[in-house]
Image (spheres, rainbow, N blue to C red):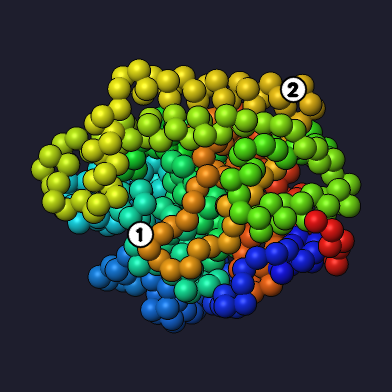
């Protein structure tokens, strides 16, 4: 059994699972938020050595600390208000950062992948963030895993493809890290590592300067220590950010029942019911609404579109460096070459159709947010797989803003998360409501143990 959002027992996990190990993250975050002083940098350096050896969230970098000192000193001299002054920032190694190579978790030569600094990186640096380094990604942001371990359970995956970004935040090295999601590469790692993720509305955050996987599906977002950090980042990263005037009203949530939810493991479904009870007890209306009834077809369209676009993105690189690609990435590209123009067009049209369908259901039922598991279950054992993104795929396909929130653990300490999804372009509302839900999901006394 396991502990849900309200302390309810949730089946799953198994006695053989390792107990939670946050690597001292709760103690480390406050200490390492400001790197403009030498004491903060020295403390971070000591902490970094320990965490990097245990979990390997960052790509190796020669001269890291000399670069960080120079960057932090530059931030210290900046005038005016800087929202992220001296804050450590992890950057997934598919984002270009001036002064650092981009390898994208692959064996491809960095000069082949090189490009101008990502707009998202530039915005956060301008706001005073200090780049701690490149975080480990799966190969080219697909499914071939890197060496990173989950700080909450070192014998289990941290998820992917934003593996290192999730682990860096979970281990307390930085309160914020950039990542991307093409299927479930932000929200799934957040769930496995017990942190927050924000996947914005499609194209709300510029994708320039990021090695693409499938441009019609790629989302730039963040992994964060809590919702407050995610909101601070969103206000800088999102184009046209504004503060919703009525964000303090209580949202109505709906669980999408049907084949989609049935794709989750029993532990995740039981946990979601516990979360529903907890939210209802805190005064939130939570409904169950049939939705995503063609889940398998949605997934097939998404994967065909992703493969076709990946094949096109990698056409020249693959021709020149085919032998350097690992098997799963090569298979994606080969499969993408066989996707017909009609199937690719169906995938593109399906995004808009799904968005309209979900928002029509929201209008009809008076729904503000969809509530669902952020992963099919707790993090799988081992590092050979980064887990199943089935719970994230429809929301990514529709391009809707989504926030993953920690929402309890199994009795063995394995994190379990939920995700909330709002209307297209309503990122401000989703994050404001996430801030209200966060303490309800994370704490509480006891609760009913019904199924």
Q: Depth check: give the residue in front, 433 or 372.
A: 372
Q: Where does the image place residue 248, in percent across and percent down from the top left? A: 80, 40
Is residue 86 at all visible to an observer of this figure? no
Quarter of the picture holding the C terminus: bottom right
Q: Which mark is residue 363?
A: 2
Q: Quadrant of the N terminus?
A: bottom right
| Residue identifier under label 1 | 145
* Residue 74 located left or right of residue 294: left
**Whether residue 437 is situated above or below residue 147 in the rendered picture:** above
- Residue 137 position, x and y percent, is 36, 56
Quarter of the image for residue 263 reads top right
User: Is residue 286 at all visible to an observer of this figure?
Assistant: yes
Report how far apart the C-alphas of labels 2 and 1 lie in the structure: 40 Å
User: For the residue labelled by badge 1, is the local secondary structure a helix, a strand or a loop?
Assistant: loop
Q: Is residue 70 left or right of residue 168?
A: left
User: Which residue corresponds to the image point at 32% horizontal and 65% vertical from the top-left?
Assistant: 59
Q: Which is closer to the viewer, label 2 or label 1? A: 1
Local crowd size for mark 1, using a 10 Å CA cut-off: few (<14), some (14–19), many (≥20): many
* Quadrant of res 149: bottom left
Q: Residue at x 83, y 52 (%)?
A: 277
Q: Secondary structure at mark 2?
A: helix
Marks 2 and 1, the one that precedes in the sequence: 1
């Amino acid at each position: 059994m396991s502990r849900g959002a309200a302390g309810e027992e949730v089946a799953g996990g198994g006695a053989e699972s390792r107990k939670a190990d946050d690597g001292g993250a709760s103690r480390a975050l406050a200490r390492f938020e400001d790197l403009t002083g030498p004491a903060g940098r020295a403390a971070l350096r000591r902490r970094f050595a320990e965490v990097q050896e245990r979990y390997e969230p960052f790509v190796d970098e020669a001269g890291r600390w000399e670069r960080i000192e120079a960057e932090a000193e530059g931030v210290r001299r900046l005038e005016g208000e800087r929202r992220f002054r001296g804050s450590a920032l992890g950057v997934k190694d598919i984002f270009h950062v001036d002064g650092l190579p981009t390898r994208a978790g692959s064996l491809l030569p960095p000069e082949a992948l090189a490009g101008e600094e990502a707009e998202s990186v530039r915005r956060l640096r301008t706001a005073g963030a200090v780049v701690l380094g490149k975080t480990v990604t799966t190969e080219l942001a697909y499914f071939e895993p890197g060496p990173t371990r989950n700080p909450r359970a070192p014998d289990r995956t941290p998820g992917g493809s934003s593996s290192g970004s999730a682990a860096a935040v979970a281990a307390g090295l930085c309160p914020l890290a950039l990542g991307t999601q093409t299927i479930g590469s932000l929200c799934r790692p957040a769930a496995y590592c017990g942190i927050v993720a924000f996947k914005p509305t499609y194209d709300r955050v510029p994708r320039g300067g990021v090695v693409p996987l499938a441009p019609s599906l790629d989302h730039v977002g963040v992994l964060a220590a809590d919702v407050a950090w995610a909101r601070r980042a969103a206000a800088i990263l999102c184009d046209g950010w504004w503060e919703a005037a009525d964000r303090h009203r209580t949202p109505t949530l709906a669980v999408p029942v049907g084949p989609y939810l049935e794709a989750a493991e029993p532990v995740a479904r039981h946990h979601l019911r516990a979360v529903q009870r907890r939210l209802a007890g805190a005064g939130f209306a939570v409904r169950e609404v049939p939705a995503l009834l063609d889940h398998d077809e949605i997934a097939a369209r998404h994967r065909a579109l992703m493969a076709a676009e990946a094949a096109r993105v990698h056409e020249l690189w693959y021709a020149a460096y085919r032998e350097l690609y690992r098997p799963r990435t090569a298979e994606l590209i080969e499969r993408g070459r066989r996707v017909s123009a009609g199937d690719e067009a169906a995938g593109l049209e399906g995004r808009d159709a799904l968005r309209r369908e979900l928002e029509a259901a929201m209008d009809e039922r008076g729904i503000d947010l969809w509530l669902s598991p952020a992963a099919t279950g707790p993090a799988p054992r081992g590092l050979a797989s980064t887990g199943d993104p089935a719970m994230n795929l429809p929301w990514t396909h529709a391009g809707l803003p989504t926030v993953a929130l920690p929402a309890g653990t199994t009795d063995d300490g394995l994190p379990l998360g939920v995700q909330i999804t709002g209307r297209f372009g309503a990122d401000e509302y989703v994050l404001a409501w996430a801030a209200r839900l966060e303490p309800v999901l994370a704490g509480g006394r006891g609760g009913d143990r019904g199924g």
